[in-house]
Amino acid sequence: MAVRASKEAVFDAPPEAILDVLADIDHVPSWSAVHKSAEVLDRYPDGKPHHVKATLKIMGITDKEVLEYHWGDRWMVWDAAETFQQRGQHGEYNLTPEGDNKTRVRFDLIIDLAAPIPEFIVKRAKKIVLNVAVESLRKRVMSHMRAR
């Protein structure tokens, strides 16, 4: 059963600042309520994460996954292989500059669940994930920019 979710928002930040926060895997658990841990296993020559081991917990369900990241100037995607809870996962952020120092952020996620889950639980989980992926990211980006 594939579950799809997406959300868009405009951030008061350039794409580079958003990608910097997304690439800072070690700090993801500090701003993402669904990440219990995240560890970079290896990196690309430019220093960006390539493979990441993560433990996620949402609505009492815990899953451990290894994510493979790919990076562009205005995007980031990841894929995860089969885990106990899912047959696969694909996530992506696409960033579109909008005027001075603003960026439209689009987040898309597809998860192929390993077993059926009641629709009301799927809806609640999607809401939590989308909030973390966009609103919690926005707060972290703003905090990161103020600290620079």
Image: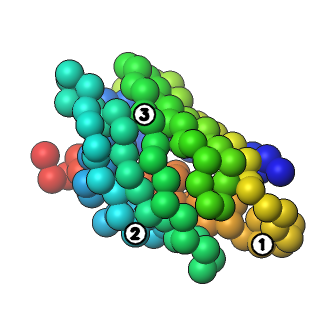
Q: Mark 2 points at which residue?
A: 36
Check disc 3: other Cα within 10 Å, few if <14, some if 14-19, many if 20+.
Answer: many
Which residue is drawn at the image coordinates 50% and 36% (left, top)?
78
The residue sitting at the left extreme is: 148
Point out the frontmost of discs 3 and 1. 3
Q: Can residue 7 be seen in this view?
A: no
Query: Disc number at residue 121?
Result: 1
Check disc 2: other Cα within 10 Å, few if <14, some if 14-19, many if 20+.
Answer: some
Which residue is drawn at the image coordinates 55% and 71% (left, top)?
62
The answer to whether 119 appears left or right of 6 in the picture is right
Q: Position of residue 73 (x, y in %)?
A: 38, 19
Q: Position of residue 140 (x, y in %)?
A: 34, 56
Q: What residue type is labelled 3?
A: Tyr
Q: Distance between the residues labelled 3 and 2?
A: 19 Å
Q: Position of residue 99 (x, y in %)?
A: 44, 24
The answer to whether 47 appears left or right of 71 in the picture is left
Query: Disc number at residue 69?
Result: 3
- Foreground pick, 86 / 32: 86
Which residue is drawn at the image coordinates 13% and 46% (left, top)?
148
